Amino acid sequence: MLVMSLHNSGYRQVHWYRAERFNRIFTLCVAILIVPLLPPVAYSQTTSISGTVSKVRDGDTLKVGPVAIRLMGVNAPELGEALGVASKEFMKRLVLAKQIRCEMNGDKSYDRFIALCFLNGKDIGETLIRAGLALDCPRFSEGRYSSFEQSKAKNEIRMPKYCRR
């Protein structure tokens, strides 16, 4: 593509630009002009993923296909801690090879997307906490699950510092 421009010196100078660079700049300009015209709903919706659970890493981490998901606001014990293995096994029986829907909030923790996940319309985090195999993580849940905590879980599961408000 040939672009001609006038400079302060008053003479015409010819610049050759690669079409590839022009296309990138043109696309960016169009995006800058169009995005503000879109209704807010078009670019502020929660990202959702639906699919089959392909793996359960532990009580609060699973994979939907190749996507790793960390249950938002849920503090399940690590595998080497009290109730850690029981929490993972419960999650396997609950969701492995089943269809779930997850609403991601846009945050990531390590390689995992943070999300609220649902099995047949029921919150998976709530189910795990009601079973006494995890605790509410109030810093991230805003207390969403605190009323479902079981006394056995409160006594046996360590609350990490990052969960405290």
Image (spheres, grey):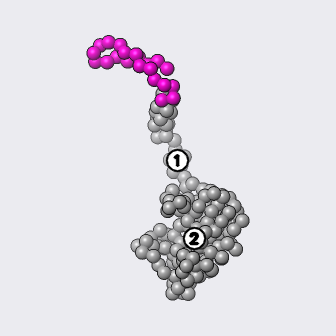
User: Which of the two marks, 2 or 1, is nearer to us in this view?
Assistant: 2
Q: Position of residue 162 (x, y in %)?
A: 43, 71
Q: Position of residue 158 (x, y in %)?
A: 48, 81
**Front in this rendered view, residue 107 or 138:** 107
* Range drawn in magenta: 1-21
> Residue at 57% across / 54% down in the picture?
47
The C terminus: image quadrant: bottom left
Q: Position of residue 5 (x, y in %)?
A: 38, 18
Q: Please state which amino acid type lies under the numbered disc 2.
A: Asp
From where the camera sits, is residue 123 visible?
A: no
Residue 60, disc: 2
From where the camera sits, is residue 92 visible?
A: yes
Which residue occupies the extreme top position in the image? 11
Pointer 2: residues within 10 angstroms few (<14), some, or many (20+)? many
Direction from residue 93 to residue 146 in the image, left or right? left
- Classify 73 as above or below 102: below
**Front in this rendered view, residue 100 or 56:** 56
**Front in this rendered view, residue 161 or 16:** 16
Q: Please state which amino acid type lies under the numbered disc 1.
A: Tyr
Q: Position of residue 117 (x, y in %)?
A: 61, 65
Report if residue 7 lies within the magenta region. yes
Identify the secondary structure beneath mark 2: loop
> Residue at 51% across / 70% down in the picture?
73
For mark 1, what is the residue? 43
> Residue at 29% across / 13% down in the picture?
10
Which residue occupies the extreme left position in the image? 9
- Classify 21 as above or below 62: above
> Residue at 63% across / 57% down in the picture?
66
Residue 110, disc: none
